[in-house]
Image (spheres, rainbow, N blue to C red):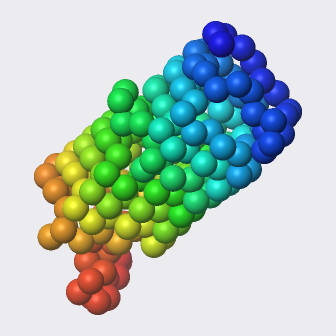
Amino acid sequence: MDSNTFEDQIFQDKMPEKGTFNHCKFTNLDFKEANLSEYVFSECVFENCDFTLAKSKQTAFMNVQFIGCKLLGFNFESCKDFLFEVRFENCLLNLANFYKKKLKQSVFKNCVLKEADFTSANLNKAQFIDCDLLGAIFIACNLEECDFRSALHFSIDPEKNQMKKAKFSLNNLEGLLQKYELKIELN
C-alpha cells in the first residue's frame, strides 16, 4: 500500500493483510499485542500509536519515524536488519530491546527508555536528546560520536563500550563513573 493514512483503529485481532506499507501515516492506532511479524514499513510515520508487547518477528522498519508512541517491551532485536532505520520523538520505550541492532545516526528525542537493552548495539553518531535512560543497558556497544549531552540517568561503563569522541555534558558525567561509587558535586 502506498501513501495511505490509517487513523483511530484497533489492530489486535484484525490486522490488515501482510504486505508492504510505503509512505503511510498511522495515527492513534492500537497495536497492543498485535502480530506485526513479517510486515514491511518503509518511509512511514507512526503518531500516537500503542505497540505495547506487539510481536515483531522479521518486521521491517526502513526509515520509520515514531512520534508520541508507546513501545513498552517492544522487541526490535527480532526485526529485519536490512535497511533498518528508526527515529523516535516523545516516545515511551521502557524495556525495549535493541540487542545487536544497527542504530547508527538514530535519533531519540524526548524519550523515556527506562531499562531499555542496547547490548552490542551500534549507536555510532546516535543522539539521545533530553532522554531518560534510567536502568538502560549499554554493554559492548559502539557509542563512538554518540551524543548524550542532554541525556539523564544513564550509567555507562567506558571500559565495556567503544566511546571514542562520544559527547557528554559536565552535568551528566556522573553516569560514566557510577561503578566507582564516587560522590560528585557540581559547585
**Number of marks:** 0
> Is 34 in front, or is 173?
34
Q: Position of residue 163 (x, y in %)?
A: 18, 56
- Residue lying furthest top: 2
Q: Residue at x 42, y 62 (%)?
A: 117
Residue at horizontal 42 percent and vertical 36 percent from the top: 80
Q: Nearer the viewer, residue 30 or 141?
A: 30
Q: Quadrant of the C terminus?
A: bottom left
Indicate the quadrant containing the N terminus: top left, top right, bottom left or bottom right.
top right
Residue 158, position as x, y percentages in the image: 19, 67
Q: Is residue 87 above or below residue 94?
A: above
Relative to 26, does residue 147 appear above or below in the rendering?
below
Residue 112 vs residue 140: left or right?
A: right
Q: Is residue 101 left or right of residue 109?
A: left
Residue at 15% across, 70% down: 159
Q: Residue at 27% across / 66% down in the picture?
A: 139
Q: Is residue 121 visible?
A: yes
* Residue 92 located left or right of residue 108: right
101 versus 7 height, above or below: below
Q: Is residue 69 visible?
A: no
Q: Where on the picture, by quarter, is residue 18?
A: top right
177 relative to 41, above or below: below
Q: Position of residue 118 (x, y in %)?
A: 37, 58
Of residues 94 and 165, the one nearer the viewer is 94
Q: Position of residue 48 (x, y in %)?
A: 73, 40
